Amino acid sequence: MKRLVLLDSHAILHRAYHALPEFSSKKGEPTGALYGLVAMLLKIIEELEPDYIVATFDLPGATYRHEAYKQYKAQRKELDSDLAIQINRSRDIFKAFNIPIYDKAGFEADDMLGTIVEKLKGDPDMEVVVASGDMDTLQLVDKKKVLVYTLKKGIKDTILYDEKAVKERFGFGPKLLPDYKGLRGDPSDNIIGIAGIGEKTATTLITEFGGIDGIYKALEKKGGEEKFKKAGLSPRIVELLKNGKEEAEFSKMLATIRRDAPIDFKLPEEFKKGIEIENAIALFNELDFLTLG
């Protein structure tokens, strides 16, 4: 079994930027997020021993989600200039490690991850590990074939999610996570969901009736409201569901990672064969990463 690690570069850089001090090189270049990225990358290489590594990126500008919903992520502050500089500079790190990058205008890094996972799902000899600082990617988990390696705290405390671990955390499987967000929303992305339905109610609805389609099929059947009452759901919640179907379905669409982004993915050269140690060390020295160089 070969192992491909997919890096959710933006999510890792964001987490490192906010978790680490504001390091800078002797030339004054900000380096805290870059240091965190390299530390995470070296940890991944040591712990996961990948055969292949690929990086994915967001690009500046609107995506199809913004076109569908103008308020998508509208509450987020403008990217700090120091972080923006390091996001651009991080491409040099991946070049030094001979790690290919995938991005596409109009799509997010998550959609690159989902598309690559989809392209490899039929390969019985390939295990995929998505490395991210973002819990959104948990919807990609598939049994023990697609795993998510994510940051719990800072950049050192990590956890590896398989399907069992996702179910233990949420009470249902990875494929229902977009439905969960469709119901309760996601403030971090400004996804509205159904106003008045929170985490606990969304979890009860999904564990009792399945995804959004299953919930509304059950509700619209003769005697459906009685089943919701027996599940401990109040008439108020039933009314919210009746009035919020369009919002739930739309929010689910926004929360769903695409698996059909128009990219031409090819497995790269095996990682251990492709890395140029001298290039990496030269870059570490340039960035004044003395403990790494």
Image: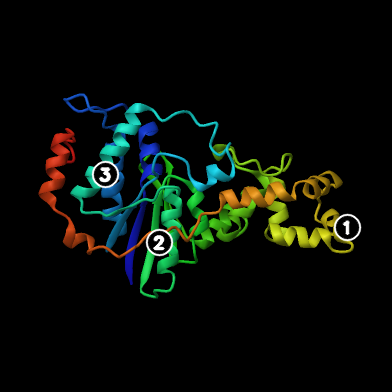
Q: Is residue 185 visible?
A: yes
Closer to the observer: label 2 or label 1?
2
The answer to which quarter of the image holds residue 40 is top left
SS state under label 1: helix
Q: Earlier in the sequence, mark 2 or mark 1?
A: 2
In the rendered view, does 110 fall on the left or right side of 31? Answer: right
Give how far across and how far down residue 63 sits, in percent.
48, 45
Horizontally, is 280 left or right of 182 in the view?
left
- The location of residue 62, given as percent across then percent down, is 47, 41
Q: Which residue is pictured at 49% across the width and 65% down the height?
A: 142
Marks 2 and 1 sit apart, C-alpha to C-alpha, by 43 Å
Nearer to the camera, 22 or 48: 22
Q: Residue at x 42, y 56 (%)?
A: 113
Check residue 197 in the rendering and tell me which mark sits there, or answer none: none
State the CA–CA distance, disc 3 to disc 2.
Answer: 19 Å
- Looking at the rendering, which quadrant does residue 54 occupy? bottom left
Question: Which residue is painted at 18% across and 37% down in the image?
Answer: 291
The local crowd at label 2, few if under 14, some if 14 to 19, many if 20 or more residues have their Cα within 10 Å, is many
Residue for badge 3: 91
Q: Nearer the viewer, residue 65 or 178?
A: 65
- The quadrant of the image that shows the N terminus is bottom left
Residue of label 1:
226
Label 2 is placed on what type of residue? Ile
